[in-house]
Image (cartoon, rainbow, N blue to C red):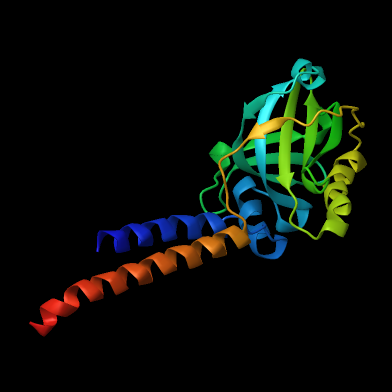
Amino acid sequence: MKTHYIALAVLGCFFFAGCATAPLKMETDGPKLAEIVGIHPSELKFISYCGFVETTREEATSPEYYPISATERIVLLTDTDLYILIDGVRTASAKDEIRVPLSELSGVTLTFNKNLRGDLVAYQLQFLRGEHVLVVQIAFSGPDEMRLEEAQRPFDLVLAAGVPKWDSEKFFLLVLPTRLDAKTACATVLGVTLVILIDILIQALIMAPLIVL
C-alpha cells in the first residue's frame, strides 16, 4: 500500500499549491491585511499576491536580461503608501512588512510579459526609489479582454498620488517558486486519484487468491 500513501501525499501537496493561486479579495482578505499594517480597511485601494525583488536603477537600464531570484509577497496600495508583506494572509505580520511612502518614490513604470502566442501573462510595477528599483510582478487573474485595464488600475493609483511616470521598458526575468493554476491542479488531483484506485485494485487482485484459500 506504499503507493497509496505516497499518492495521497503528492495529492495533498499539489492540491495546496493549486489552491494558493486564488486571487486576494478586498472584501474578505482586505480587513486582515489592513489590520496587519495598522490602517482602516477603507484605506486599501489595491491588494494582490506578487513576486518581489529589489534591484538597482543601473540594472533596470541595462540591456542585458538574465534570471533574478525573487520572493512571493503580497502588495498593498493606499493613497499614500506602498506595502510589501510576506506571502500568506494568515502568516503575514507587521515585522515582515516593507512600507514605502509614495512621496518617497521618484518614478513608476508599468511593463508587460507575453507568452509565445502574444497573450499577456503578467505585468510589473517598477518603483524607482533613489538608485533602487522595487519590482512587483503580478500574474493576471481576469479575462484576456480585461487585462490591460487590470494592470492599469494600480499604476493609475500611484500616478494619482503624484508619482511621476518613469520610462523603463525592461521586464525583469523573475524566478519564483512554481504555483499550479486551477486547471493543472484539477488534472493533478484526477491523475493521482486514478493512481490510488489502480493501486487499490491491484492490491485487491493480489489478495483475492489468499481470501479464497
Q: Quadrant of residue 79?
A: top right
Residue 179 is left or right of residue 193, and the answer is right
Farthest-out residue, bottom: 212
Q: Quadrant of residue 123?
A: top right
Question: Percent x, y for residue 93?
Answer: 54, 45
Q: Quadrant of residue 50?
A: top right
Residue at point 82%, 19% (across, down): 61
Most foreground residue, 103 or 134 = 134
Q: Quadrant of the C terminus?
A: bottom left
Instruction: Report the label total.
Output: 0
Residue at point 69%, 44% (across, down): 75
Q: Quadrant of the N terminus?
A: bottom left
Placement of 125 over or under 182, stated as above or below: above
Question: Percent x, y for residue 160?
Answer: 92, 42
Residue at point 79%, 52% (across, down): 45
Placement of 168 over or under 149, stated as above or below: above
Question: Percent x, y for residue 37?
Answer: 64, 46
Most foreground residue, 102 or 20 = 20
Most foreground residue, 170 or 79 = 170
Residue at point 77%, 17% (across, down): 131
Most foreground residue, 3 or 15 = 3
Placement of 213 over or under 87, stated as above or below: below
Farthest-out residue, left: 213
